[in-house]
Image (cartoon, rainbow, N blue to C red):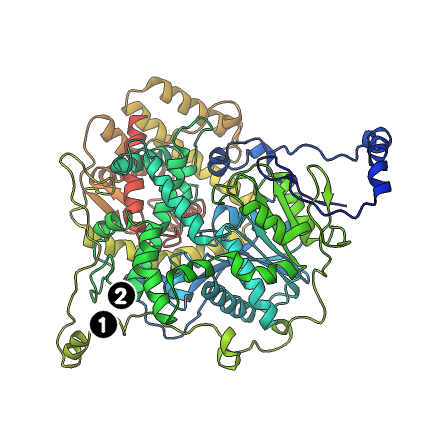
């Protein structure tokens, strides 16, 4: 039986915490003898707790690097995850530039038998497809749960699609928004999913949301969560966000070197990025490939947070027409450039957002409320009575979490008592995937924890503590399982999901409203934040030569629409009817055919080593691998080197020219478009013509179509699911950096 262990029974500095005791004087005198008996008779039997084995004791290293692969909990490499959408507010006006966020996206993994359903809520700015969310989804699915992965209320999709105010960060309001979303999802899936009960888990900011959701559900009683787990929550949201704000100052040379540091971080990511890897642009993508000896990890965390803030602030500003970054009353179209707005948004801190947008809005909603009182509401302390008495709410945290203030760990231990598990190190969610952590997490939800014998203080280091008893899935089933969900209008006013209250109409000055009523065009008001003036010699990393940007942005939207309504449905159908084993064999065949292109361009570049390796790889996979069905060459030390004619032209010094977005093919440049045409012509001569596919059109169409679907199947990128309204700009930058590195290497 798994036990809840407080690995850090004393405080983080090793000082003993006061403990109540009921030992009589006789027992006190007998205690040394009892301890001796324990060590002599019991300890050798293996009852003592093993030391905590998570390897990274530096909190910055742990936060950025996470858990080494060999120490991660085993989860399925692939599960059947369905991506779905739900309409939260019918008829809500969405600005044209945010057209892709009319519905809220989420994912669900469904068991083929009745099972409990667990909702997972991610951290700041993260989407339902965040890597940590996906890991937890696989782990809980393996444990027998239906799993719904949600996006954070601070994610750019959630703000226009599901936020009541459009200004996220108010934990109580955010919880109401999430609660409404969860109700609608249950309504959406109840005919397809046999649910026996509900659970809830969240990490980082999502853990704070989970706490407020549990408190809301105690009053509403719709889900009656069997277990609620908070993983690394902030005690004070304001304090934690300000701590992250401060990390940007750790950039070598200060914030004046922001652009240079951003360039270095993005280039490092580009060097590791491959087409068959996902990218989310929520900030943490910059952590990929970092080393434990990197001296700039704190600054990297600050940069990651700043990117998440840029996504949040710009989306909120556009949606509410607040006139903060975007000029007030200016309607942006999908062909308008957002590059200049990115430059401004990327310099907005949480403190700026709080004092300029967040606090003015919520203070206006509650007359008499002070800013200090508002900050106190953004804290677990505001629901402390609930957290103390809730036997089904559990906590997992790290004593060295970067987002905690002095005294926070002792406070959490006092509030959650035996329901808290505090690990000595792990940074902020760095040890979330560690096998010991994951085993304990699942034990909480699988009812493997001992029943609570009484309230008291957590045990000393290595001493097991008890966990509160609560049925994981109470009976009778929650109302959401048996009948209609309670509509918002029928809910008590204090728990009713907030309507759309964003200050879009009210914030327009009276003179502007009068002019609009008379048929005059809306008055465009300059934004409150302006782009900073560049110092001589300084340029923005985000700037890429893109002279036909409006055309490219229009093409980008066309590709997104084509992908969503045609390409992806065909690809999903292919994945549904084709066994995974056969999918891998088909991909291998097409990959082997493309080695001819790689070989030809390696020859043209006069690179003998690359040419020899590519030829050897092609020879091995064509013979031993039966035409590419298998890939023995990689195991024999001959990995794939992707070469194309665009790289060949760049190898000989041809500049990329202007950036171009091609129909269907996506990001390119004038040089790479020329290279694509050259590779296509070569493909005709070495494959299409020799195999008579130019004459046998049916065979040629079948081959080309299957190749296209297989290529899309192997690219996890999904338009507008990267978590950033600046996706076009960041994809453009990633493509440009990646091609530069391809040619250099």
* Left or right position of 693 against 619: left
Q: Look at 41% across and 57% down and name the residue there.
A: 154
Q: Is residue 79 visible?
A: no
* Residue that badge 2 annotates: 321
Instruction: Give whichever of 484, 121 is nearer the camera.
Output: 121
Report crowding for label 1: few under 14, some 14 to 19, many 20 or more residues within 10 A (C-alpha): some
Q: Position of residue 478 (x, y in %)?
A: 65, 71
Say whether disc 2 or disc 1 marks the residue closer to the N-terminus.
2
Report crowding for label 2: few under 14, some 14 to 19, many 20 or more residues within 10 A (C-alpha): many
Q: Is residue 66 visible?
A: yes
Query: Residue lying farthest top?
Result: 608
Q: Is residue 369 above or below residue 398?
A: below
Q: Is residue 632 above or below residue 330?
A: above
Instruction: Give whichever of 592, 467 is nearer the camera.
Output: 467
Q: Position of residue 250 (x, y in %)?
A: 35, 35
Q: Quadrant of residue 682?
A: top left
Instruction: Give whichever of 515, 716 is nearer the camera.
Output: 515
Mark 2 vs mark 1: in front? 1
* Left or right position of 508 against 643: left
* Residue that badge 1 annotates: 508
For the C terminus, give its image quadrant: top left
Q: Look at 30% across and 66% down and name the residue there.
A: 320
Marks 2/1: CA–CA distance: 9 Å
Q: Position of residue 370 (x, y in %)?
A: 38, 64
Contact flag, marks 2 and 1 (Cβ < 8 Å): yes
Q: Look at 70% across and 37% down and name the residue there.
A: 462
């Amino acid at each position: 039986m798994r036990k809840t262990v407080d690995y850090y029974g004393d405080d983080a500095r090793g000082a003993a915490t006061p403990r109540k005791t009921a030992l009589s004087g006789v027992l006190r005198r007998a205690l040394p003898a009892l301890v001796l008996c324990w060590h002599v008779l019991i300890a050798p039997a293996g009852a003592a707790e093993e030391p905590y084995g998570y390897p990274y004791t530096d909190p910055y290293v742990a936060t950025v690097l996470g858990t080494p692969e060999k120490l991660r909990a085993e989860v399925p490499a692939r599960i059947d995850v369905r991506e779905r959408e739900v309409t939260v507010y019918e008829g809500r006006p969405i600005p044209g530039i945010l057209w892709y966020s009319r519905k809220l996206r989420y994912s669900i993994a469904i068991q083929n038998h009745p099972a409990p359903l667990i909702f997972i809520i991610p951290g700041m700015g993260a989407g339902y497809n965040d890597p940590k969310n996906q890991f937890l989804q696989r782990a809980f699915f393996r444990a027998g749960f239906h799993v719904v992965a949600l996006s954070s209320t601070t994610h750019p999709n959630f703000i226009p699609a599901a936020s009541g105010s459009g200004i996220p960060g108010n934990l109580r309001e955010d919880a109401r928004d999430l609660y409404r979303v969860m109700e609608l999802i249950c309504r959406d899936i109840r005919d397809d999913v046999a649910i026996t009960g509900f659970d809830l888990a969240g990490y980082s900011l999502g853990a704070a949301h989970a706490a407020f959701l549990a408190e809301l559900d105690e009053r509403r009683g719709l889900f009656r969560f069997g277990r609620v787990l908070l993983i690394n929550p902030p005690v004070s949201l304001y304090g934690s966000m300000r701590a992250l704000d401060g990390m940007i100052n750790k950039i070598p040379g200060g914030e004046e070197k922001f652009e240079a540091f951003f360039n270095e971080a993005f280039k490092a990511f580009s060097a590791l990025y491959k087409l068959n890897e996902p990218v989310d642009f929520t900030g943490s993508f910059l952590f990929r490939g970092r080393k434990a000896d990197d001296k700039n990890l704190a600054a990297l965390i600050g940069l990651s947070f700043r990117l998440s803030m840029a996504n949040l602030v710009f989306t909120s500003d556009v949606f509410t027409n607040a006139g903060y970054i975007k000029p007030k009353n200016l309607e942006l179209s999908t062909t308008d450039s957002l590059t200049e707005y990115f430059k401004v948004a990327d310099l907005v801190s949480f403190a700026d957002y709080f004092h300029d947008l967040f606090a003015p809005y919520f203070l206006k909603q509650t007359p008499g409320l002070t800013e200090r009182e508002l900050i106190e509401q953004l804290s677990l302390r505001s629901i402390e009575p609930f957290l103390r008495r809730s036997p089904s709410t559990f906590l997992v945290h790290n004593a060295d979490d970067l987002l905690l203030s002095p005294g926070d760990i002792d406070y959490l231990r006092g509030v959650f008592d035996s329901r808290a598990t505090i690990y000595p190190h792990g940074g902020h969610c760095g040890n979330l995937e560690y096998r010991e952590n994951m085993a304990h997490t699942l034990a909480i939800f699988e009812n493997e924890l001992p029943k609570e014998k009484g309230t008291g203080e957590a045990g000393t280091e290595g001493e097991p503590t008890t966990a509160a008893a609560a049925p994981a899935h109470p009976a009778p089933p929650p109302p959401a399982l048996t009948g209609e969900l309670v509509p918002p209008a029928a809910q008590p006013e204090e728990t009713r999901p907030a309507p759309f209250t964003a200050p879009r109409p009210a914030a327009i000055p009276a003179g502007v409203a009068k002019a609009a009523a008379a048929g005059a065009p809306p008055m465009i008001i300059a934004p409150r934040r302006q782009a900073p003036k560049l110092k001589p010699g300084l340029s923005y990393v985000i700037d890429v030569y893109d002279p036909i940007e409006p055309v490219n942005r229009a093409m980008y939207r066309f590709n997104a629409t084509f992908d969503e309504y045609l390409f992806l449905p065909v690809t999903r159908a292919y994945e549904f009817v084709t066994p995974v084993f056969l999918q891998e064999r088909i991909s291998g065949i097409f990959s082997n055919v493309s080695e001819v292109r790689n070989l030809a361009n390696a020859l043209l570049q006069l690179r003998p080593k690359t040419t020899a390796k590519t030829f050897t790889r092609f020879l091995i996979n064509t013979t031993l691998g039966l035409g590419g069905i298998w890939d023995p060459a990689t195991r024999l030390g001959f990995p794939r080197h992707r070469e194309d004619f665009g790289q060949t032209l760049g190898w000989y010094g041809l500049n990329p020219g202007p950036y171009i977005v091609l129909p269907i093919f996506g990001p390119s440049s004038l040089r790479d478009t020329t290279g694509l045409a050259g590779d296509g012509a070569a493909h005709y001569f070495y494959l299409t013509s020799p195999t008579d596919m130019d004459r046998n059109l049916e065979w040629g169409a079948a081959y080309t179509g299957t190749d296209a679907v297989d290529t899309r199947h192997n690219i996890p990128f999904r338009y507008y699911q990267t978590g950033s309204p600046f996706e076009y700009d960041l994809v453009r930058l990633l493509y440009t950096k990646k091609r530069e590195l391809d040619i250099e290497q």
